Amino acid sequence: MVENLSLAELLKQPKTIEDIDIPQNIILDIILRLLYSEGNVSFQRINKVIRVPNVLDILLEWMKSEHLVETLPGQPELGRWGYVYTLSKEGELRARAALERSQYIGPAPVPIHYYNRAIELQTQEKLEVNFSDVEKSLSDLILPPDFHRRIGPALNSGSSMFIYGPSGNGKTTIAHAMAGLIAQATPIWLPYALTAGGQIIQVVDR
């Protein structure tokens, strides 16, 4: 059950198709779009984009058996890393259909319930910042005298915060400073993309 998984378990590289816990067609579509966009693509390149090395062989072999991809002479001395893949005629048709469903080409998305669990685990510890923390993080900015005292309690509340104002007044700079203050030395793990209801939602803009 996902709700019993630790953050370390959620971040582990999947070893099987079942471990990925999303429909196989979602990953196949990403591979098809990649090959359609780039032409002849090496195993190494596909792995760099999709980022599921333990199951990539299985997926590509299945695509070969379904006559969606073909292998071309590559660099045999590199083993599987030197294989080069290209779309067959049938693969091109499937790739066009995949592009109509989504334009996403990137790392395999994670299921939304994994994402929810990861966020829950990373927000269990209540943040406590004090006035001097906020003042130090915003020391490079010229702000109203009471700004630091207002934004500190907003951060400590653990709720969403909406910063608004005219263009060029420092909203983005403040947001970056506050994000650094929240994260401090602990990284916040986010997926590149997640999937829900068969749709891909991109989280990180690469």
Image (cartoon, rainbow, N blue to C red):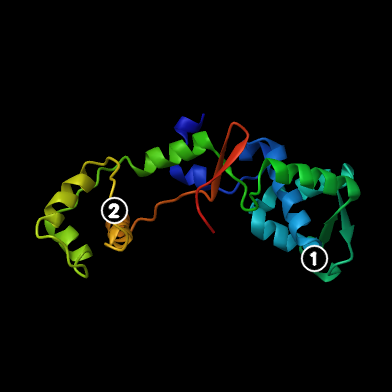
Above or below 75: residue 131? above
- Foreground residue, 96 or 18? 96
- 143 to the left or right of 49: left
Q: Position of residue 26 (x, y in %)?
A: 68, 40
The residue sitting at 74% across, 58% down in the picture is 37
- Residue drawn at (33%, 42%), measured in percent from left and top? 123
The answer to whether the residues at label 2 and label 1 have Cβ atoms under 8 Å apart is no
* Of marks 2 and 1, the one in the foreground: 2
- What label sits on residue 182 in the rendered view? 2
Query: Residue 171: horizontal and vertical position, in percent?
Result: 29, 58
Residue 33, percent from left and from top: 73, 51
Q: Which amino acid type is shown beneath numbered disc 2?
A: Ile
Q: Position of residue 170 (x, y in %)?
A: 28, 62
Q: Residues within 10 Å of mark 1 (few under 14, many from 20)?
A: some
Q: What is the secondary structure assignment of the residue under circle 1? A: helix
What residue is rendered at 47% in x and 46% in y? 8
Residue farthest along the top direction in this orientation: 1
SS for dot 2:
helix
Residues packed near mark 2 inside 10 Å, few (<14), some (14 to 19) or many (20 plus): some
Q: Quadrant of residue 154?
A: top left
Amino acid type of the residue that numbered disc 1 sits on in the rendered structure: Gly
In the picture, measured across the screen, residue 20 lies left or right of residue 120, that is right
Q: Is residue 151 above or below residue 101?
A: below
Upstream in sequence: badge 2 or badge 1: 1
Q: CA distance from mark 2 to mark 1?
A: 43 Å
Mark carried by residue 82: 1
